[in-house]
Every structure is written in C-alpha cells, then in structure tokens.
Amino acid sequence: MTGERNRSLGQYGEGLAARRLVEAGMTVVDRNWRCDAGELDLVLRDGDVLVFCEVKTRRSAAYGHPLEAVDATKAQRLRRLAARWLEAHDVRPVGVRIDVVGVLMRDRGVADVEHVRGIG
C-alpha cells in the first residue's frame, strides 16, 4: 500500500510541476522516459534550451525538503540520463539544462512548489 501511495504522490507532484513549468512558458516534450539506466520525470523545451527536470514530492519536510534529495550523485545520474535521451531521440539542442522541482504538500492539499534551474 505504501508503494502505491508514494507512486500516486509522485505522479501528483509531477503533474503539478509540469503545469507550473508550462505556465512559466515551457513546453513538455516527454514525461516519465525510461531506459535501463533509470527514468527522467520531465523533458521540456524552454526557448532553445532542452530541460531535463527531476521532480521530488514529499508529504512533509520531516526528512528534509524535497530539493535536498537531489545530491551530486543524483545530478550526475540525471546528466547521464539526459545524454541517453538525446542519443535515443537524435536531438541536438542549442542548450541543455538540468532543473529540479521540489513539491512539498501542506495541509488540505495545498502544495509549495519550488523550481531550481540549472543544477548540473
């Protein structure tokens, strides 16, 4: 049951993040892309830049803010996944950026959404 609840929470956070990023002028190119090395939550276009975005969603900050979950090791993994996505789709954008969106759920379903551009 916990795995299913976490998956649902993650999907909710990704949907919320995608909506916020689209409202900020980005275009969603791909969602939940998987390969043998892992998964990319969101791939977006921000002008001429292709953005690979990790979304972390938590119910509380008891174990730290969601953004804290993306450390140097995770950022390196995201860079490798971005390279794999570019290769798989034969895309050569003008620029590439790795972003993170932290979604922290608050009481009564209200969420704090924080977007950090260019972590890696």
Image (spheres, rainbow, N blue to C red):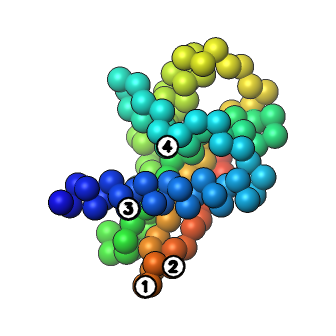
The tally of labels here is 4
88 over 79 or under it: above or below: above
Q: Can residue 30 be seen in this view?
A: yes
Q: Residue at x 50, y 65 (%)?
A: 103
103 over 86 or under it: above or below: below
Are circles 3 and 1 on residues that touch, CB within 8 Å?
A: no
The local secondary structure at tag 3 comes to: helix
Given the image, on which type of amino acid does mark 2 rest? Val
Could you tell which of marks 2 and 3 lies nearer the N-terminus? 3
Residue at numbered disc 3: 9
Q: Can residue 119 be seen in this view?
A: no
Given the image, on which type of amino acid does mark 3 rest? Leu
- Spatial CA span between label 1 and label 4: 25 Å
- Position of the N terminus, as image quadrant, is bottom left
**In screen coordinates, is 8 left or right of 111?**
left
- Spatial CA span between label 2 and label 3: 13 Å
9 over 44 or under it: above or below: below
Q: Residue 10: x, y in percent?
A: 40, 56
Could you tell which of marks 4 and 3 lies nearer the N-terminus? 3
- Spatial CA span between label 4 and label 2: 21 Å
Q: Which residue is drawn at 44% across and 68% down?
A: 65
Residue at numbered disc 1: 107
Q: Residue 86: x, y in percent?
A: 60, 22
Residue at numbered disc 2: 110
The local secondary structure at tag 4 comes to: strand
Residue at numbered disc 4: 41
Q: Residue 79: x, y in percent?
A: 53, 32
Are circles 2 and 3 on residues that touch, CB within 8 Å?
A: no
